[in-house]
Amino acid sequence: MRWDRFFDDLEDQLASEWEAERAALDTEAERLRLSRVAFAERLTLLSMRDAPPEDAVFDLADGTMLRAVVTGVGADWTALAPTEGRSSAILVPFAAIVSVGMPHATLLRTARPAPARPSLAERMTFGFVLRDLVRRRAGVAVHLLSGRAVTGTIDRAGVDHFDLALHDPGAPRRAGAVTGYRLVPFSAVAWIRADESPAMP
């Protein structure tokens, strides 16, 4: 009888060690998977259409705290819809996001494996979406890292900068309404509020 218990104990010990080893391998595999997850993938999971929209608090480089829902994610920027105040499209380069606050359950959900992002989204750079605003002649408020904001219409968008014709917010871009021009590098932008939403994939 004692030998039966001895072998039962050995089997239990081996099963326990096997489970511990498998759990350690699963944990290591999960760590390896997480080490390859990009910021864009986490934001993409916040924008999934199959789940109810969840707002988050975006702490931006100019000191703005913006409560918003992620509506789209490009190669190096995200589109947000504010949940408070004026409704408009907000475009934020990833480099201007200091942190994103959300409940713990939402944080964990964004770490799950994400479906493959559309190849178009991977090619839609910040310059690409600004060129869409040029085409639409949409009025914008450009919030700079310095804390200043300027309003107008983007006339041209290059690979790393854009030309902004300054005029009053809400006014159409007419020669008589333009009060000046600015050449703005993308690296100086904290966020842009667009009067008309850009096209999303």
Image: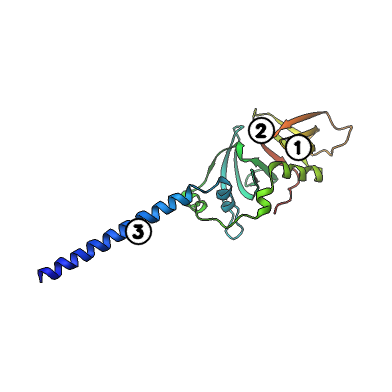
The crowd level at tag 2 (other Cα within 10 Å; few <14, some 14-19, many 20+) is few
Q: Secondary structure at mark 2?
A: helix
Q: Which residue is mark 2?
A: 187
Looking at the figure, which quarter contains the N terminus?
A: bottom left
> Which label's residue is closer to the chain start, 1 or 2?
1
Q: Position of residue 13 (x, y in %)?
A: 22, 61
User: Residue at point 35% right, 57% down?
Assistant: 23
Left or right, 168 with reference to 124: right
> Which label's residue is closer to the chain start, 3 or 1?
3
User: Residue at point 27% right, 63% down?
Assistant: 15
Q: Which residue is mark 1?
A: 158
Left or right, 163 with reference to 56: right
Between the C-alphas of marks 3 and 2, the distance is 46 Å
Q: Note whether 32 is above or below 183 in the view shown.
A: below
**Quarter-of-image position of residue 116:** bottom right
User: Residue at point 30% right, 60% down?
Assistant: 18
Residue 97 in view, yes or no: yes
Q: Position of residue 112 (x, y in %)?
A: 50, 55
Residue type indicated by callout 3: Arg
Q: Which residue is mark 3?
A: 22
Between the C-alphas of marks 1 and 2, the distance is 13 Å
Left or right, 5 with reference to 138: left
**Quarter-of-image position of residue 49:** bottom right
Q: Residue furthest right?
A: 176
> Which label's residue is closer to the chain start, 3 or 2?
3
